[in-house]
Amino acid sequence: MLTKPKPLLVVTDAATNVIISGKQSVIYVTNINRIFPAIHELQPCSIILDYDYIGNEIEKILRRIIANPFYKKIRICCYKSRSHTKVDDLFRTLGVQHFIYGEDEQSKMHANIKMLNNMLQGASLNKLVETIYA
């Protein structure tokens, strides 16, 4: 008997900041009023809330999720452009298990680009040295 894997629910705006790669089915919710109907219909395994999109409403949403035993098994993640100690601590208390920071993703991307540039420059220097000594 095959069971359909539960989707990942991502709450963000249409110009998505949160890009998910992998084999898991991802459902994007772009209307804050559709969060709970989508959770009820889809019964996702995890939900990612985009703090930059939801803003001040996120605290109400988190309180509603932790207050309802129907949502107990849902893993809650929060995407934020940067960390903030007090806000993050409050969200952890309200059930957020994992944070994804945009600044971390950008720094990883910049590090990968820098590494690639260094490799290309190193390869160019190696070819230059080979041509000089050949």
Image (cartoon, helix red, strand yellow):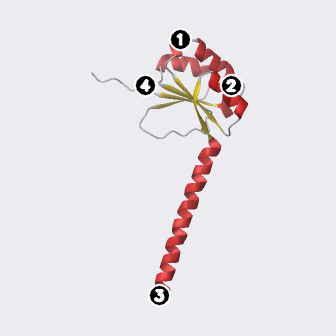
Give the crowd class for mark 1: few <14, some 14-19, many >=20 residues within 10 Å. few
Mark 3 highlights which residue? 133
Left or right: residue 37 compared with residue 83: left
Disc nearest the viewer among 4 and 3 = 3
Residue 2, disc: none
In the rendered structure, which disc, 2 or 1, sits on the residue that comes first in sequence?
A: 1
Mark 1 highlights which residue? 69
**The residue under label 3 is which amino acid type?**
Tyr
Mark 4 highlights which residue? 6
Mark 2 highlights which residue? 90
Q: Quadrant of the C terminus?
A: bottom left
**The residue under label 4 is which amino acid type?**
Lys
**The residue under label 2 is which amino acid type?**
Leu
Disc nearest the viewer among 4 and 1 = 1
In the rendered structure, which disc, 1 or 3, sits on the residue that comes first in sequence?
A: 1
| Pick the front one: 14 or 101 | 101
Tell me what residue is drawn at x 67 percent, y 28 percent.
Answer: 89
In space, the residues marked 4 and 3 are separated at their CA atoms by 60 Å
Query: Dot 4 lies on which element?
Result: loop
